[in-house]
Image: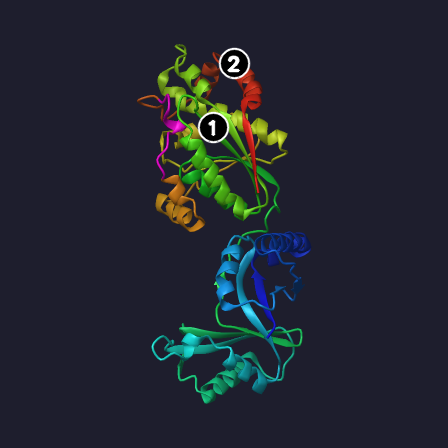
Amino acid sequence: MKRFILIHYGEIGLKKSNITYFLDKLRKRLRFVLQDEFKINYSIKHTLGRFLVSLPDDFSVDDEAKYVEVLFKVFGIQNFKFVYESVIDLDDLGEKIWENLPDYVLNTELKPRTFRVLVKRSMPLPFKSIELEREIGARLLRRGIEIKVKMVDPEFVVDLEFFNDHSYFSFKKYRGAGGLSANSQGRFVSLISSGIDSPVASYMMMRRGARVIFVHFHAYPFSDKSEMENVKSLVGVLSGYQFDTKLYLVPFGKFQKSISTNLDIPSKIRTVLYRRLMVRIAERIARNEHAKGLITGDNLGQVASQTPENMFAVHDASTIPMFYPLIGFDKEETVNLAEKIGTFKISKLPCSDSCTMFMPERPELKANIYDVREYEKFLPINEWVEGVLKESEVINLK
């Protein structure tokens, strides 16, 4: 039987006059990831609020897991399922469903205890949806499925959709990543470290359609290269959620050292000055890349630099928008999401941490913005910003 991936999108369907733009972006992403992974040309059709992706004739149950892994990384998908295309005639349809039931459904030891038929129709039929459910369910019971019917929370569902003069049935529905189509909201620059938070913040913005360019500030040669290597691995994971990806590796240790050894600057204010300089450099990169804003993994009150006063002092250094996707997250929520998207294990690897180098013993918790601006006058900020990009390494990832 002919097989398809049947894809439903969520929030994209609310875009009204702009929906074509988002659907084109989603179609492009689907074609890109599937053809890149499986080296096959796919027919991707949009019809009645759905995408139908044709599957090769030799598609098997064993292939399904590979496709699921790829589709989980496509933003804009609400859910998807691997369907069989069939007929409208209920007798023939019931027989086709029976013939293609998963083996475990009829296995005495593994079979589910309850089932139901669920119908969605987008075409005129002589039956209402609930009547279709009863008719197909009755045919399966007569055929010998030997499982009790349960309409609420059954263990097994026969999922049916009727549209375009065909029926499409499946036995499992996968939840998609949701969000908006990849690269639908333009470019943003993310300040990424090897920690848990900033990779998750980057993912959150990707899920909203951002095309993310990464900037990592490292302390080499004052530290080893372990942090840079971990960041490369993190960006490698995140690049699977968007198209080609760019990573800037910015040498920052010498600036930290210069600030920390300047006797005109109180030690407790160093952290805020480090971060203001990072923001200025990232902003320059954003302007060069025609990006619309900066992304950080800041979380309100989590560490000394993330008190309301200090965040205000850092944000003051930017003349473009700054985005904080994790601002109200509980740490456990961030960790759970990091585990889900595949960055947590890398973030937990040991490495030298440039963020903790040249740090004061007791950092300022409530920086005064006017004092901070005065302290910066002792530093050649503009000269540093102009010069550092010439020393930065740029890595392009697929």
Binning the other alpha carbons within 10 Å of mark 1 as few (below 14), some (14 to 19) or many (20 upward) gives many
**Residue 328, position in %: x, y?**
41, 43
Q: Position of residue 363 (x, y in %)?
A: 34, 24
Q: In front here: 255 or 17?
A: 255
Q: Nearer the viewer, mark 1 or mark 2?
A: 1
Judged from the image, the secondary structure of the residue bearing numbered disc 1 is: strand
Residue identified by numbered label 1: 217
Residue pictured at 42% horizontal, 51% vertical: 340
Give coordinates of residue 379: x percent, y percent. Answer: 48, 13
Label 1 sits on what residue type? Phe
Q: Identify the residue shown where x is 67% and y is 73%.
A: 164
User: Quick check: 293 above or below 260?
Assistant: below
Residue for badge 2:
380
Residue bounds of the magenta highlight:
349-359
- Quadrant containing the N terminus in the rendered view: bottom right
Instruction: Report whether residue 325 is seen.
Output: no
For mark 2, give the secondary structure. loop
Furthest residue toward bottom: 142
Q: Is residue 114 left or right of residue 4?
A: left
The secondary structure that dominates the magenta segment is: loop
- When the figure is inspected, residue 70 is found, relative to residue 149, above or below; the finding is above
In whole angstroms, how far apart are the C-alphas of marks 1 and 2?
18 Å
Three-letter amino acid code at the position of disc 2: Pro
Q: Is residue 382 left or right of residue 290?
A: left
Left or right for 164, reference 382: right
